[in-house]
Image (spheres, rainbow, N blue to C red):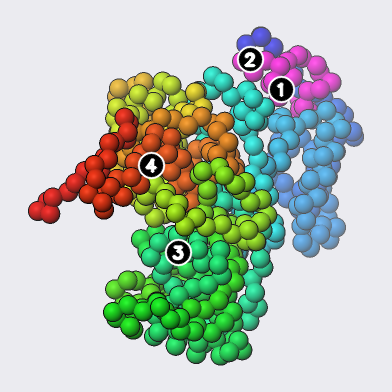
Amino acid sequence: LRDLCMKGAACEFLHQYDLSKMPLCRHGERCKIKDCPFRHISEADRLECVFYSQGFCIHGPFCRYKHVRRERVDLPAVADFTLGLSQMQAAGKDGVTARRPAPKPNEFYKVSLCKHFLQGDCPFGDGCHFAHGEHELKKFPRNKMEEAAAAGGGEGEELSDNMFSNQETTTVDYFQGGSAGGGKPNPIHEPEQASFFVVLSATQDDVTISASRGEWYVPRKHAEKLNKAYRDGKRQVMIFFTVSDSLHIQGAALMTSLATYQEGMESNEEDESFCYRFKVEWYRTTELPIDTAVEAAPDLLLPTRRTQVCQDMSCKTGESLMKVVWNSPLVTLYESFDGDADPPAPDAILTDFRCPQPHEVAWPVMPGPGFIFGCNSETMDECLGRGILGLPAHMKASAAVIRPGSPIFLFNVTDRLLFGIFESLTPAKMNIEPTAFSKNPKATSSPFPVQVRVRIALECPPVEDTDQILNDILRMRVGGRIGVLSHAQAKAVASLLASQCGALQYMIEYDQGAKAGAHVVPPPIALPPRKIDADQ
């Protein structure tokens, strides 16, 4: 009323004195306050208090509604206070309007999978706000900044917390950038009548080739175990795949034939030769963290190179692992970086498998996911100078995939350029440098407190955000550039950067020249590999 409200026209209160719109005076006709600003009506016109009519009202004589005394026999045996909703709705007819606007619908409803459902039992049931299965998953909403960028208004953007999608509530980014849903349905309907194994692959390429060709090789002792479980096709055998040192489950396939001996595959140690081949049909390609798998299946034993590369498990453990794998979004096992072929459609991940060409060489990165951090033109020098990259606090969960050696990239949101290749020196920690990215030299917490130390693994010219190959590689991502990358995406992005500066071609020529004893001239940006002495 004194024209001092900072909200202006956006204020939910009335900016004028209108007696007809004022709330009712609690004292009614008994009011003795001089110039009382509230509205007064006769006792006969006052609504009856629903709570008092059922026996008790907490407001007592100060209640704005009429209290009519009744005999005990006229009161209900069990009070139904939900009737008060109708009283509050009726109050609006008397000029008492709601002070706050109606709440907006929850735009994040069912955009991520329920962690309780993944473990087998959700206490909230049908009322849970998270998705119970892939069929309930909804697309993560795009904010205004992303919509403007999609419309071509990405110029001049500055780094802010809004640039980062809410990683703790998005299934997509938690599972390394894959699009949730789709894929083949689970083929095993009676887990107690099936057998389950998990096998260890030496490299990611081996898993990719297996998915493309539909086959897998094991030593003789494991072939005998698998054939015994298979029983000439009378029993379903589900095989999960993990890659050495990746700390992830890469997918699941169904055994479709006996393991048979293949000539010409022997080595000096016949028992350890991978000379027994069997056919498989892939049903799921994912990138499930081992920690999540063990949390869902506590009795899970993983194969190792020191023990055995094929480990069996109980039906109960297999059922739990199968459930969490099928509730994990799909990811591709391979991404092309040469641009020679169009990528498969999003709904063809499990029908259009691709694998590296026989002579294709990719830039080596550590097994496991990578990560794209964000900066702007003002903070980029600080990122490179300190050797620290940061994220907002809500991305702490998704940054947990980072470990020493993980491939890291830096996206400049102002210039729309992707820089790399970086390598993480530490896992993601809170406030490694509390004053980083802050204008307050005495700050105790950075505005981007989830931080990781990095070093330059290879200095490459940046890739523009509009690059067609880059967009093909990251086509499965939603919510912007910043976030987790699957291993296939990280490897392809690193190879794309390395190929543009000549480092990838130099690596190939260096390897060929080293075998032939020739000297190879390095490119102007990429540095040749440093020879490590044996005594170091």
Q: Residue at x 41, y 67 (%)?
A: 201
**Circle number at residue 13:** 1
Tell me the kind of residue under disc 2. Cys
Q: Residue at x 85, y 58 (%)?
A: 74
Q: What element does badge 2 sit on? A: loop
Q: Are marks 2 and 1 in contact (CB under 8 Å)?
A: yes
Q: What element does badge 4 sit on? A: helix
Front position among marks 4 and 2:
4
Q: Hey, which quadrant is residue 181 in on the image?
A: bottom right
Q: Image height check: is 419 above or below 77?
A: above
Tell me the kind of residue under disc 1. Phe
Marks 4/3: CA distance?
23 Å
Marks 4/2: CA distance?
66 Å
Tell me the kind of residue under disc 3. Asp
Q: Are marks 4 and 2 in contact (CB under 8 Å)?
A: no
Whether residue 524 is visible, yes or no, is yes
- The residue where tag 2 is placed is 5
Per the rendered image, the range of residues in magenta is: 6-35
Q: Image height check: is 62 above or below 13?
A: below
**Circle number at residue 62:** none
- The residue where tag 4 is placed is 505
Of the numbered discs 4 and 1, the one sitting upstream in the chain is: 1
**x, y percent for residue 464:** 51, 29
- The residue where tag 3 is placed is 206
